Image (cartoon, helix red, strand yellow):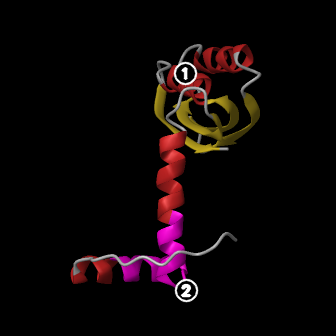
Amino acid sequence: MADLARIGVAIDSDLLEAFDQAIARKGYTNRSEAFRDLIRDQLSREQDQCVDAQVVGTITLIYDHHVRLLTERLTETQHHHHGLIVSTLHVHLDRHDCLEVLVVRGTSAAVRAVADQLIATKGVKHGKLVLTAL
């Protein structure tokens, strides 16, 4: 680990109490590591906004597989972007609904474009992109 720097932060006592409760639920043993994780998360989110940043992440889709031609359209889009899609997981949730999780890797712009295309496909009930900059 690099040299550590100590800082002082003024925080409203109610906010600090809520923060302490939240980090305790998550299993943090001290505030410092929780603050470091928050900072790393923010920096990663800012970095993955750069169009040429290399990112990894997931695209999660929930859809009714009975919607006419939906599975074919989703599969066609995935094949068209095979260079970005590392792996997929397909789960049958019930008689109609499926959950699909795609692991993606590439530039932020390319990954966001394929995610937008998949999520916007008619018949997709819910979609979400989660990215982390490399």
Name the residue carrying label 2: 29
Viewer-closest of 115 and 65: 115
Q: Is residue 11 left or right of residue 86?
A: left
- The residue at which mark 1 appears reads as 113
**Image height of 119 relative to 15, above or below:** above
Q: Secondary structure at mark 2?
A: loop
> What span is in magenta?
19-37
Residue 18 x %, y %: 31, 78
Closer to the camera in the image, 67 or 32: 32
Q: Quarter holding the N terminus?
A: bottom right
For the residue pair 54 and 99, the one nearer the viewer reads as 54
Residue ID at (73%, 29%): 85
**Element type at marker 1?**
helix
Percent position (x, y) of residue 115? 55, 27
Q: Which circle's residue, 1 or 2, is located before the other in the chain? A: 2
Residue at (55%, 81%) from the top-left corner?
27
Q: Is residue 39 magenta?
A: no
* Main secondary structure along the magenta-highlighted residues: helix
Kindly identify the amino acid type of the residue bearing the numbered disc 1: Ala
Residue found 30% across the figure and 83% down from its top: 17
Q: What's the residue type where badge 2 is placed?
A: Thr
